Amino acid sequence: MVLAAAAAHAAGTILVFGDSLSAAYGIGQKEGWPALLAERLREQKVNYSVVNASISGETTAGGVTRIGEALARTRPDVVIIALGGNDGLRGLPVTQMKANLEKMIAAAKAARARVVLVGMRMPPNYGPRYTREFEATFSDLAREERVTLVPFLLEGIGEQRDMFLADTIHPTAAAQSILLDNVWRGLAPLLGAK
């Protein structure tokens, strides 16, 4: 597990709870979008620290088992849930993913944290029905649970081959600022930031 806390005496804490796309897989930790988020908060003098509890390969089922301890340890004001991609890549049932995301949102709310849910999409080779249901799960859940939605973490880089590592799944260091911008659009209003 990656734990990177920024700003020793911050007024609030943001917990990033994701998979390899948030764990800076294949690049340096300081190059990943959560580290860039901590930098942006410092630059804009927004008094929040960032704790990145993302794990490569994590599924929503794994997230459910870990979130209680992560919430208790970090006591976050905001939780960014960026899980589901590995569920999709494994072809797991969308209903199971949704139920797991609901449990994590409920746990975060019970800990009095605001939630940002980060959406993901599957490539078309998973079939039109699965890809449609998978993508819709995030928007449906955000609406039902009244949490902030970032529609698609990889918005703006999906068709750009040079923005991905050789595995064609994980974004390069150069792509991380775009991922941050995608998350920032949903997160900034919760922090009173620009």
Image: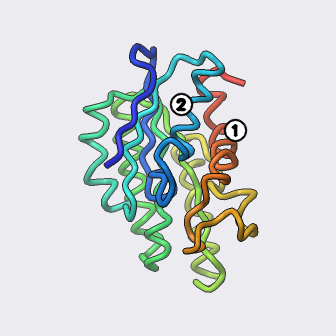
Residue at image point 59% right, 24% down = 191
- Where in the figure is residue 76, as x and y percent of width and height? 39, 29
Q: Which residue is mark 2?
A: 38
For marks 1 and 2, give the one nearer the viewer. Answer: 2
Q: Residues within 10 Å of mark 2 (few under 14, many from 20)?
A: many
Q: 119 left or right of 52?
A: right
- Could you say which is closer to the camera, residue 22 or residue 193? 22
Indicate whether 128 appears above or below 10: below
Q: Residue type at mark 2?
A: Ala
Q: 160 left or right of 54?
A: right
Q: CA distance from mark 1 to mark 2?
A: 15 Å
Q: 121 left or right of 34?
A: right
- Where in the figure is residue 80, as x and y percent of width and height? 49, 42
- Could you say which is closer to the camera, residue 193 or residue 92? 193
Q: Residue type at mark 1?
A: Arg
Q: How is the image coloured?
A: rainbow
Q: Which residue is mark 1?
A: 185
- Where in the figure is residue 28, as x and y percent of width and height? 49, 49
Q: Outermost residue toward the front?
A: 28
Indicate whether 70 appears above or below 89: above
Indicate whether 10 appears above or below 68: above
For mark 1, give the secondary structure: helix
For mark 2, give the secondary structure: helix
Q: Residues within 10 Å of mark 1 (few under 14, many from 20)?
A: some
Residue at image point 65% right, 58% down = 154
Indicate whether 88 appears above or below 185: below
Return the disc, 1 or 2, that comes first in the chain's sequence.
2
Residue at image point 43% right, 26% down = 13
